[in-house]
Image (cartoon, helix red, strand yellow):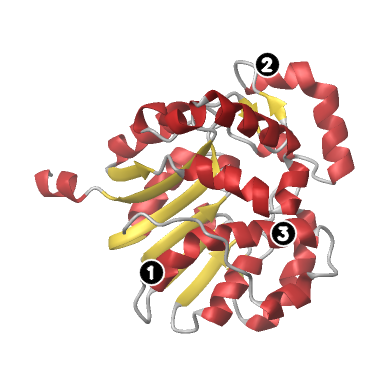
Amino acid sequence: MARISGDEIKINQTVIERCSDLPKSNIWISEASFGLGHINPYLCLLPAGARVLEVGSGSGILLSHIKLNYPELEVQGIEPIGSGFDSLNAYHESLQDIGALIERCGYEDFKSSEKFDLIFLINVFEHLPDWIHFLSFVKSKLIKNGTCFILCPNYGFPYESHFHIPLILNKNITHRVFKNYIEKFEAKQDCSGLWDSLNFVRWSQVKKACIKIGLDCEFDGSVIRQMIDRLDHDKEFHRRHKVMGKIAKVLGKSGLLSLLTQPFFNTVNPYMKLEVSLDMQRDKIL
């Protein structure tokens, strides 16, 4: 698929009205809008009858939008409601009659024998306990010309964006240093278990794993500019990421922002925008 920008597109108004009074609706609507801006152009390229799978549907807002706006596509999602996300049950109940099928399971227990034209994950990949195993799942579930689209933090950059703290060498040491802060944050935000769910995945690791598994993976370095643009037009996102906003200003003034968009600096780009597909050249050789 051609490289596509992440311009903001509004979530279906019916979906918003169903969720507007639910807990943290401003956050979940903001996140769904962000995901839609990146995934919508891919959906536009799919033919009628194409199959789409969202891994980690979260609130179900994005999947419900796709169900309403792309009735010609076969869409479904999987969401186990992991640690720190119990409040999502209310969203699923409010949106269930729209008809977007969300199976309450992890990808490991997803029993469908179908293959998909498009698989996507929006800020989910960093929560997978075994992301390498997931990439093997992707290989088994994509059609020949299918694409898996991934958006997630890159822990090659020393910053943890959920808790807004610097990464000190690794997850364990960072936890020791910020233990009290992390516990207070989870209690205040009602997201117990969030820290434990993070896998601290890095681009360098994903690149090596894809080569080994037999997948082609492209990194769109321009995502850093798109994230900074989001700070300007998404008030909810800016409110939650004031530290990131300050870092962005430093990057812009220093000229480092332009460098981060270049392939050589993908390893330290704070965010990953990945297109994963079957490595057809390797399959031919094998």
For label 1, the SS is loop
At label 3, counting other C-alpha atoms closer than 10 Å, the crowd grade (few under 14, some 14-19, many 20 or more) is many
Examine the rendering and report whether any part of residue 234 can be seen: yes
Q: Which residue in the structure is indicated by mark 1? A: 114
**59 vs 89, nearest the viewer:** 59
Helix, strand or loop under label 2: helix
Answer with left or right where residue 118 lies relative to residue 103. left
**In percent of the image, x 55 and y 26: which residue is there?**
157
- Image position of 22 with respect to 277: above or below: below
Among the two numbered marks 1 and 3 on one chain, the one whose residue lies closer to the N terminus: 3
Three-letter code for the amino acid on which mark 3 is drawn:
Trp
Calculate the distance from the C-alpha at mark 1 to the C-alpha at mark 2: 42 Å
- Give how far across and how far down residue 165 sits, in percent: 72, 27
Query: Residue 106 occupies which quadrant of the picture?
Result: bottom right
Which label lies toward us, 1 or 2?
2
In the displayed image of the protein, which residue is found farthest to the front? 253
User: Horizontal and vertical percent for residue 215?
Assistant: 30, 45
- The residue wearing badge 3 is 28
Please state the total of marks drawn on the protein image.
3
For the C terminus, the quadrant is top left
Which label's residue is closer to the chain start, 3 or 2? 3
Residue 112: tell me if it is visible: no
> Does residue 41 sit above or below 154 in this rendering?
below
Q: Determine the residue positioned at 44% across, 43% down.
A: 222
